[in-house]
Image (cartoon, rainbow, N blue to C red):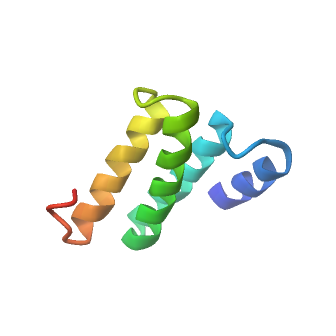
Amino acid sequence: LYRQCWEVRKKTLREDHPDMLTSINNIAYALSNRGNYAQAEAMYQQCWEVSKKTLGEHHPVTLGSIIGIANALDCQGKYAQA
């Protein structure tokens, strides 16, 4: 369902729209919960790159992406990077 929402939003919203970024974070969260940590890391990274430019470093979506990246790295055993 997260992907369906993202696909609909992609048709009407810009990549840097907060709702788009939330959709990307939601997909990354679901991937992480299913043990797909590398894919989750990539999605969180994508969201972080866009959100820090458009929403700022202190926005909740940006911070959530950083936390997600750290968690995905940690789950992959990449402790130094996390």
Is any atom of residue 16 visible in this view?
yes
Left or right: 43 in relation to 75: right
Q: Residue furthest front?
A: 53
The quadrant of the picture occupied by the N terminus is bottom right
Left or right: 54 in relation to 28: right
- Image location of residue 24, percent across then percent down: 58, 52
The quadrant of the picture occupied by the C terminus is bottom left
| Residue shown at the point (22%, 62%) measured from the top left | 74
Q: Quick check: 53 above or below 74?
A: above
Left or right: 15 in relation to 45: right
- Image location of residue 38, percent across then percent down: 40, 72
Q: Quick check: 70 above or below 60?
A: below
| Residue shown at the point (60%, 43%) measured from the top left | 21
**Frontmost residue, 34 versus 79:** 79
Q: Give the mark count.
A: 0
Is any atom of residue 36 visible in this view?
no
| Residue shown at the point (50%, 48%) measured from the top left | 49
- Image location of residue 20, percent across then percent down: 66, 44
- Image location of residue 4, percent across then percent down: 73, 58
Q: Residue furthest left?
A: 80
Dividing the picture into quadrants, the one containing residue 35 is bottom left
Q: Quick check: 27 above or below 23?
A: below
**Frontmost residue, 55 versus 18:** 55
**Frontmost residue, 75 versus 59:** 59
Left or right: 11 in relation to 66: right
